[in-house]
Image (cartoon, helix red, strand yellow):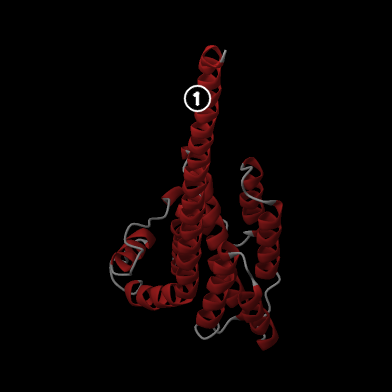
Amino acid sequence: MGSAGQPNHIYFNMKILNLFFIGILSICFISSCSKEDAKSISLKEELDVENRTLADDINNNVYDYHYQGLLYAKTQVVLSPKPSIITILDAFNSGYSNYSSISVNGTLLSNVVTNKSNLEPVVTSSINKLNDVSSISTEKKNKLTELKSTIFNLQLTTAYRNSITSKISTETDQDVKAGYNLLLSSFDFWIGEITDNDDDVQAIQLDAAGYIIGWVHSVYEDYNNGTLDPSGQGRRMRAGAACGLACSIGKWF
């Protein structure tokens, strides 16, 4: 009787052993997946930090880029024949770190400079284009609208300048913060350059409006090309700054 029951006993033990090995393999598989997931999350976090660091660097640089660009342009607009806005911009960008590959759409620039005496509707229309881009948050659009309001309620006072520096120190959205940095640069440059207050106001508004329009244009291009992702944030900010500088140069034309 004992030998007759042995095959069942062996079968039962083998079944337990198979279940044990299956359990071990499952644990190893889950552990491996968890490690891969952890690696993916870690890589994503590293990329996010890298993008934020790059955006910080560009933001810290926007003021100098714009101000130095205007100083350079001032030496070029007196030449005969006078170089075009794009020629001056490209020449400056070619020698400025991280801007050599940044260009400004000529048609876009012409539209901004042509409408420089009535720019607010142009900026509003530009911001409204972002309604087509689902990945752009309502919060960001509201912040851009607030930046626009700051631009077109400009006052040539110390209090107004202080309000810009306060925005720069508290704004957490890097794309919007860059607009305030360029607005501050424009304020500081033109207030010492033009004696007519009305011209001062228009020049400063032209520069900062150019940032918004250039940035939105770059976002929309990336959206249409399927390349609107965080890795392009720095390039889009530089595109906005370059458009702002091009519009600044347009003041002399």
From the image, tell me which residue sits under label 1: 14
* Corner quadrant of residue 4: top right
Residue type beneath disc 1: Met
Which quarter of the figure is the N terminus placed in?
A: top right
Which quarter of the figure is the C terminus placed in?
A: bottom left
Q: Is residue 44 above or below residue 166?
A: above
In the rendered image, residue 81, in percent from the top left (x then y), is placed at 28, 66
Residue 28 seen: yes
Neighbourhood count class around disc 1 (C-alpha, 10 Å): few under 14, some 14–19, many 20 upward: few
User: Residue 111 vs residue 101: left or right?
Assistant: right
In the rendered image, residue 124, in percent from the top left (x then y), is placed at 67, 53
Report the front residue among 231 and 141: 231
Determine whether the residue tagged by mark 1 lies in a helix, strand or loop: helix
In the rendered image, residue 170, in percent from the top left (x then y), is placed at 65, 75
Determine the residue positioned at 58% across, 81% down.
196
User: Residue 183 vs residue 221: left or right?
Assistant: right
